[in-house]
Image (spheres, rainbow, N blue to C red):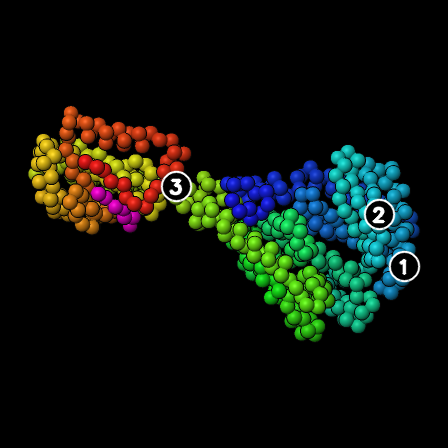
Amino acid sequence: MAEYFPGLRFGETLEKFLDRKVRPDTMFLNSCGEVINTVVRLIHQHPIYSIKEVIKGGSLGKGTAVKDHSDVDLLVVINNFRKIDDLREQLPNIISSFAEYLLAAVRGETIRIKNTKQALHTLQFKVCCVEDGDWFDVDFLPIIDVINPLNVRGSLEIVYKKMEEEYHNRNYYAKCVARQQVSFVKRVPSRAKDLIRLFKYWNYTEDNDLSSFCIELLVIHIWQKKGSPNNFEKAPMIYDVAYQISFFKEITIAFDDFYSSVNFITKLERSPPYVLDPANPFYNAGPEMGVNGDYSQVQERGRMLLDNLGHAMAEHFPGMHIGETLEKFLDRKVRPDTSFLNSCREVINTVVHLIHHHPDFSIKEVIKGGSLGKGTAVRGHSDVDLLVVVNNYRNVNDLRENMKGIISSFNRYLLAAVKNESIEIAIIGQTPFTLRFELCCAHRDCWFDVDLLPVINVIGHLLIFWIQRIHSMTQHLTRESKVTIVEFKSEEKSCWII
């Protein structure tokens, strides 16, 4: 089976796969939450800097973490500075001070910090709880408060204006508006976040060039195009995201939650591909591929995923949803529903009753065969064979000579007899051995095929014995065995050799 997501087992539902391979377990998340809260508490207790608040971002803060690939961004709002120039000038000292402070402060706590690294805008380190030893990445980002909560849009317009004018401060302002980026992703419902996790998992396992943030925006874009639903079928949306990636070079994604994307796309002369940060119109979250813009690897991986999605469904059965179990697929597409089977049973019993009352023939019994008689019917492809044991003839020669008359007589008789019943009949035609027609209940428009086959009791009931034997064997098959018949049954109609 072509694996559309590495590690997905045959017949495993997407939900079970997400729990087993993609979503971090609750214990890990709870442990991370405690560790992060401890770090946040220590940050607030720094002896030099006054901290207004710490905003939790990254995959753990936004709720999009993937098993074994979790991180948190701590956006630390510092009260000591009012201007971005002051923050920029003091940032190396701020980061250095917090690096020394946190390494010392955690010694009295049940957490550990390692691999501290100072970058231009951030302090990067790993942290874990002593008890479980699960390490995860932390980016510590000092920022200042540039947004008035009573006028967020107006404040952002001022910030964007400064970002446009003060190129040297653009990246510093970008960190200060990251709060809006976090809230944009965080408010997405859990089902959409599951798709984000799924594509992040695929991105990690396939070693793609897409950032986690880019994946988040790709999924959210498709989710919004579908009307931003809380509940939805995941399979079609998975396909749409994969399709989007397979044509990445042509992609144009922007959001209007915090700014007019059209204005900035025009002003900055954006050309595809771009996936614009919803909080920062100057940042393209898509991968940088140099001057030539070679996105062939990204697109190729997307097309491979797209092909595998189609192949995986086709390798199960046509129409089978991604991650759908065989049992659910059988109920949804293969097995006839109970109401239909009950209706068929009533119609067949009525016809059998009429056959027994034919004025010209003595009927010993009517044996029900075909897919409905044997319990192997497929939705939309149901039939029944009615083996009518006629007492009027004692040898095969008599039966053969009179077969045409018998079939014609049953044709005329049934057409007249059903007029007083709550069923409908449509004659298809006659063959040398059968009368073929369609039946349905007058109350439901569900037609099925019927073959009426006159037979006789010969050789000490040997023929009847074997017909009944085969019928009985089929009736006693387990449900699983009948499923096998459904899956491998030939399109050619089975016939009785008499």
Instruction: Give the residue number, with chain letter if any, for mark 1.
Output: 90
Residue that appears at 51% across and 44% down:
1
Asked whether 252 or 163 is in front, the reply is 252
The answer to whether 322 appears left or right of 142 in the picture is left
> Is 448 part of what is drawn in magenta?
yes
Q: CA distance from mark 2 to mark 1?
A: 19 Å
Q: Is residue 443 visible?
A: no
Asked whether 195 or 313 is in front, the reply is 313
Q: CA distance from mark 2 to mark 3?
A: 59 Å
**Res 476 quadrant in image:** top left
Nearer to us of marks 2 and 1 is: 2
**Secondary structure under the numbered disc 2 in the rendered image:** strand
Residue that appears at 11% across and 41% down:
403
**x%, y% of residue 497?**
21, 37
Nearer to us of marks 2 and 3 is: 3
**x%, y% of residue 147?**
77, 62
**Secondary structure under the numbered disc 1 in the rendered image:** helix
Q: CA distance from mark 3 to mark 1?
A: 71 Å
Marks 2 and 3, the one that precedes in the sequence? 2
Instruction: Give the residue number, with chain letter if any, for mark 2.
Output: 116
Range of residues picked out in magenta: 444-451
**x%, y% of residue 460?**
15, 25
